[in-house]
Image (tube, rainbow, N blue to C red):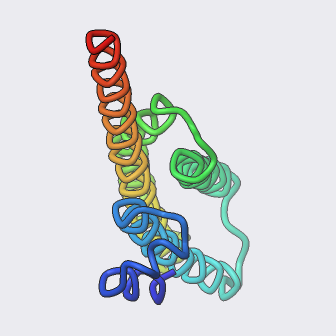
């Protein structure tokens, strides 16, 4: 993606060959970078969890699973908003849920800090989940911008078609 994006900045024939506008390529490039960062955080989470030697308490496990699911859903919803024609409302839901999820992660971090038997490395997991939610919100924002631009383009195209039709009617 990055290679095509860079070439498209310099060569119009590259844009034509891809069948995308420069603006669409920019959105796709932005999303690709954010998804790459999500993958980095996922790797960090997997590394930390695989290094844990003792099982977590049931309460912490339940909260981590719940927050992980919310985070994963946010990423999937945001990516769908860009690639699968997801709804604008779903992308807005990702943005609205971000602060609540970050607050829940902070509460769990406090709980881990106060717990005597919690592994300090879990803070890295919580940080990665928080960063993942941030990246999901950036993806959702790109989806919203893309939707707004596409809607504006469609409105402009409708206006042009309507104006052309009016001109042809008045000419005859």
**Residue 54 position within the rendered picture, expressed as x and y whole percent measured from the top left:** 71, 78
Residue 74 shows in the view = yes
Q: Where is residue 152 in the image (x, y as percent from the top left)?
A: 31, 35
**Front residue (pair 106, 169):** 169
Relative image position of residue 158 (x, y in whole percent): 37, 25
- Residue at 44% of width from left, 80% of height from top? 13
Q: Residue at x 28, y 21 (%)?
A: 163
Which image quarter holds the C terminus?
A: top left
Residue 56 versus residue 44 in the image, above or below: above
**Total marks placed:** 0
- Image height check: is 99 above or below 10? above
Q: Nearer the viewer, residue 145 or 118?
A: 145
Residue depicted at 47% across the width and 28% down the height: 89
Tell me if 145 is positioned left or right of 56 in this view. Answer: left
54 to the left or right of 160: right
Report the side of 12 relative to 167 (left or right). right
Work out whether residue 54 or residue 36 is closer to the camera in this orientation and state it.
Answer: 36
At a point 41% along the width and 62% down the height, the residue shown is 21
Q: In this view, does 143 lie above or below 64?
A: above
Q: Which of 131/22 is in front?
A: 22
| Residue 114 visible in the picture | no
């Amino acid at each position: 993606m990055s290679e095509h994006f860079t070439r498209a900045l310099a060569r119009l024939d590259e844009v034509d060959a891809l069948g995308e506008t420069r603006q669409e390529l920019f959105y796709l490039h932005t999303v690709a970078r954010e998804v790459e960062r999500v993958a980095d955080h996922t790797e960090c989470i997997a590394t930390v969890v695989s290094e844990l030697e003792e099982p977590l308490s049931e309460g912490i496990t339940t909260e981590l699973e719940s927050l992980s699911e919310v985070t994963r859903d946010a990423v999937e919803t945001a990516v769908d908003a860009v690639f699968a024609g997801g709804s604008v409302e779903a992308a807005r839901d990702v943005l609205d849920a971000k602060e609540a999820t970050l607050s829940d992660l902070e509460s769990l971090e406090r709980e881990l800090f106060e717990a005597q038997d919690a592994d300090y490395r879990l803070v890295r997991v919580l940080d990665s989940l928080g960063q993942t939610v941030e990246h999901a919100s950036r993806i959702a924002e790109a989806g919203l911008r893309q939707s707004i631009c596409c809607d504006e383009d469609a409105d402009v195209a409708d206006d042009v078609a309507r104006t052309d039709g009016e001109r042809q009617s008045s000419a005859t």
